[in-house]
Amino acid sequence: MNNIRAAVIGLAWGQMHLDALRRIKNLDIVAVCDSDVERAKLIAKNAAIKNSYGAVNELLAREDVDLVTVATPPATQFDIANQALLAKKAVLCETPAGLNATEAEKLCKTAQQRKMAGAVAFQTRYLPAYAYAQELIAEDYLGKFLRATVTFQVAQPWGLNGNWAADEKRGGGVMRNVAAHFIDALLWWFGPVQSAFADRETLFSQVRRQVQVGRETQVEKFTATADDTFTALLKFENGGTAILNFMTGARQDLPWSITLIGSRATLQITSGALSGKRDTERDFGQLQIPRRLELPDRPREPLMWALCELATDLTKQLRGEKLEGRTPPTFQDAVNTHKVMQAIQRSSDDMLWTNV
């Protein structure tokens, strides 16, 4: 089969997509698109990409595009991804793949009806510690799953990201933009969530940040409506529970961590390292991750390289190659993650245990 011909839509976060796609063998980036036409032209020129667009429909009209990556904000992801599928393009969509489960479900249906491949950028599954944890869990390393604890704390309030990231209606917030990856991992490891109890807040709603306007630095004031902190208790169908504690504006960055406790062992991921201890072992220590799961060159940019591995698997699927082990996350995975996040939101609003 000839090289896969790819295009990237959305060139803010999409620059990571460009970096990832450029590293894939037998793939050519033939076009980019952004609502800022001048940015699209500049990025295309710097990356030696021949074609740039400001309108999505013009790019999708090209017959020489096999794969489209959608790296726009959540509020526009559904429309663009759906148009791409209808245009008979395979799609790799950024998380969370739309604003809600309904949009993600529609993407599932369109992909099935058009018989096109669809994947979602839950690339944390491809981080070595996550991938090896999944293998150990599948081998019953933990025994019966009892409890997972996820902790994430950063110094700056989430609202300082500004723009859509601070806007609830446009899909912003720490839950949709960060915690979605952790929720997807928990679902991957332990299966469906039954119910949720949560408190979701915007603690730092009045935001002041410095912005560059020409040669001057000005202070911009705005109101953040998206969540910047939340705590959730999840009950899984298998009987296990998970506690999620996400805090921004804590004035201190701390290493994020995931602790997984089972009936006969514990695993912990801390900033990319995997540690563990079985009941039969004396010490809790770092585990050696198999080399086959390591990212190239032990990179300084693990999320970009993980996205590269995910996209590589997607291109193999497009060529009809058989994948060994893991497969790229699908639109159905996005549906499942959205349903958990929506249960968290409803629980916080009603202050009640809420079924997923």
Image: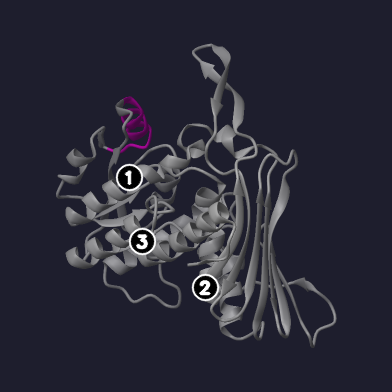
Between the residue at mark 1 and the residue at mark 2, the CA separation in whole angstroms equals 36 Å
Q: What is the x, y in percent for residue 166?
A: 52, 37
Q: Do the residues labelled 1 and 3 touch (CB within 8 Å)?
A: no
The residue nearer to you, when weighing 53 against 243, is: 243
Q: Please tell me which of labels 2 and 3 falls first in the chain.
A: 3
Residue 24, quarter of picture: bottom left
Location of residue 280 with respect to 94 vertically, above or below? below
Question: To which residue does mark 1 refer?
Answer: 8
Q: Is mark 2 on a helix, strand or loop?
A: strand
Residue 135, quarter of picture: bottom right
Inspect the magenta stretch and tell me whether residue 179 lies in it.
no
- Image side of residue 188 versus residue 155, left or right: left
Inspect the magenta stretch and tell me whether residue 48 lies in it.
yes
What scheme was used to colour the molecule? one colour
Question: To which residue does mark 2 refer?
Answer: 194
The residue nearer to you, when weighing 119 against 160, is: 160
Q: Please tell me which of labels 1 and 3 falls first in the chain.
A: 1
Question: To which residue does mark 3 refer?
Answer: 119
